[in-house]
Image (cartoon, rainbow, N blue to C red):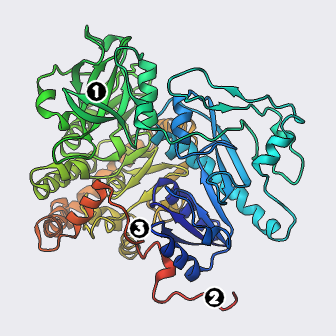
Amino acid sequence: MRILLLTHSFNSLTQRLFAELKADGHELSVEFDIADRVAEEAVELFRPDLILAPFLKRAVPESIWSRHLTLIVHPGIVGDRGPSALDWAIMNGETEWGVTVLQAEAEMDAGPVWACVRFPMRAATKASLYRNEVTTAALQAVRAAIQHVPDWRAGEWAPITLAEIRQVAPVQGWEEPKAYPATRASGGARHADMAGCAALLPPYDRAFVCGKLGLERPLMKRADRVIDWTRDNTQTVLQKLRAADGFPGVADALFGTPCSLFDAHPATPEELRPAQPGEVIARRDNALLRATIDGAVWIGHVKRADGDHRFKLPATAAFAAEAAALPELAVPLHREASDLRWSELRYRESPDGTTGFLAFDFYNGAMATDQCQRLTAAIEYARSRPTRVLVLEGGRDFWSNGIHLNRIEAAASPADESWANINAMNDVCLALLTLTDRVTVAALRGNAGAGGCFLALAADYVWARDGIVMNPHYKNMGNLFGSEYWTYLLPRRVGPEAGRRIMGNRLPLLARDARAASLVDATFSADLPTFEMEIARHATALAADPAFAERITAKAARRAADEAEKPLAAYSEEELAALRRNFYGFDPSYHVARYHFVMKSPQSWTPRHLARHRDLGWRVPFSR
């Protein structure tokens, strides 16, 4: 089919759907939902068989949905309506949630249901659930809905309306609506359990239209998320922070300054100190420890409401002077998995001591200068250990997205901080490239972008979780040239010509496509716990390989031969020379693009590499 993605932005869900549906053989184009007339023009140009809206912040205009089949991807269960579906699900402690694909009509989220997929809820932030469970369920539901389109056009299949679902509910033995547990956040919302959903009669899809039946709930306002530090226990505090993570954050104050809070992690009992609820008592990495009535939480990021930097920053950077006066609650880098104390870096070893695992879970995958320096030191520590294999796990949601654009934007000199940050990223890559006495593995548990992709290529092997998305290019950030030794690493893996194509392609790349392009050596299970077990098993096999000594000898010999042909320093110098023009030259494209990225400026047009229907050479095929 020819599918037009109408979306507010090219976010993680939209990227995954774009890449997967393209791999399924569909013809895709994207239009950002900027204005009715712009969307109408896109439909006229592309003449799609289907319009799919994976991420919108306003209703699809009637001029489109009344004439063209338009399906909405809603991150909520059947019958759930409103813009805060996932927020309320987290706040109300739902144990199961879902994604519904429904047809656009006059009422938002009230059209006929085409498909729905459920998933168990995880104790995680809204952003993490969205990138993982919601995205996976959305892909399944969209594919199911697309399969129905030919039969729908032929009049042989029809989606089920909410009125029909409610009409047959008593017949199928579903329970009457009942109230949520009485909490301040619930707002009196109600739902009905629909245990007999699988018994829905044809023509309805028994596999997807099932689960609870939700009702319309209002936009969750800041007042709904307010934390009462004198009354809310740790679990309640975490629920509110997790439901607001990503956007809009929890409105609060630190050190008497109004701000929004993000990126929360529970503290362990051994980390607690005598303190009044709400008091900030310690710091670690880039986070602040804040006491609750029965424990404490780490606050990783904040957005101050005063001053010039009204965007998300690490808590210790946003309140640098106040944080410096707090005691540092250090935690060892090397600790067992059973040690639940939070930190950005963690190193552990396999029971037999042959394999080291280094995790670096940086918020949104962004790596600031100081974080790169700490990661380099962690790799040096791993070098001192008597292991044979080092697995770099990155973070749960992101492997790495390269330099920290928010920290750069907040710096007194963004150009100078860009320079410091990219040099620190290069140091991380160099530490990996010169680790020639053991095998290194980049285990991509989450998405990777820009410099993060090339950091992964610095390892001997790149193993990726199926379903993750890679963006191995820099051009979307104001034609940034990039570094991280990519001019050495990329051609070494794929060859010069393929390397040029990859760098020129500004579209997301699925892990299995990256494997086909030799950017990734192997892909494993999409299920994260299974992926981690598979990684551990394969790493153990590498360490036990009888030919391990020969492998290490060959690795060291190749590195020496490459260095003799052209030193790594030469690659770095050439890349940095190009970057110096990006950072300090007359063309401000990088600085402009970074500013708009950090400030989340509204889109004014859709990039041409996404909006194929706006190419000058675009023509509707004659057969249509």
What type is the residue that disc 1 sits on?
Answer: Leu
Residue tagged 2 = 621
Report, in whole angstroms, how far the alpha carbon at label 3 lies from the one at label 1. Answer: 35 Å
Disc 2 to disc 3: CB gap under 8 Å: no
Residue shown at 63% from the left, 51% from the top: 109
What type is the residue that disc 3 sits on?
Answer: Val
> Mark 3 against mark 1, which lies toward the viewer?
1
Q: Secondary structure at mark 1?
A: loop
In the rendered image, is residue 485 in sight? no
What type is the residue that disc 2 sits on?
Answer: Pro
Task: Report the disc number at residue 395.
Answer: none
Q: Is 557 placed left or right of 470 in the picture?
A: left
**Is 356 located above or below residue 158 in the figure?**
above
**Is 68 located above or below residue 293 in the figure?**
below
Q: Earlier in the sequence, mark 2 or mark 1?
A: 1
Residue tagged 1 = 333
Residue tagged 3 = 494
Report, in whole angstroms, how far the alpha carbon at label 2 lies from the one at label 3. Answer: 34 Å
Q: Earlier in the sequence, mark 2 or mark 3?
A: 3
Report the front residue among 603 and 393: 603
Q: Is 500 placed left or right of 111 in the picture?
A: left
Q: Earlier in the sequence, mark 3 or mark 1?
A: 1
Report the front residue among 7 and 343: 7
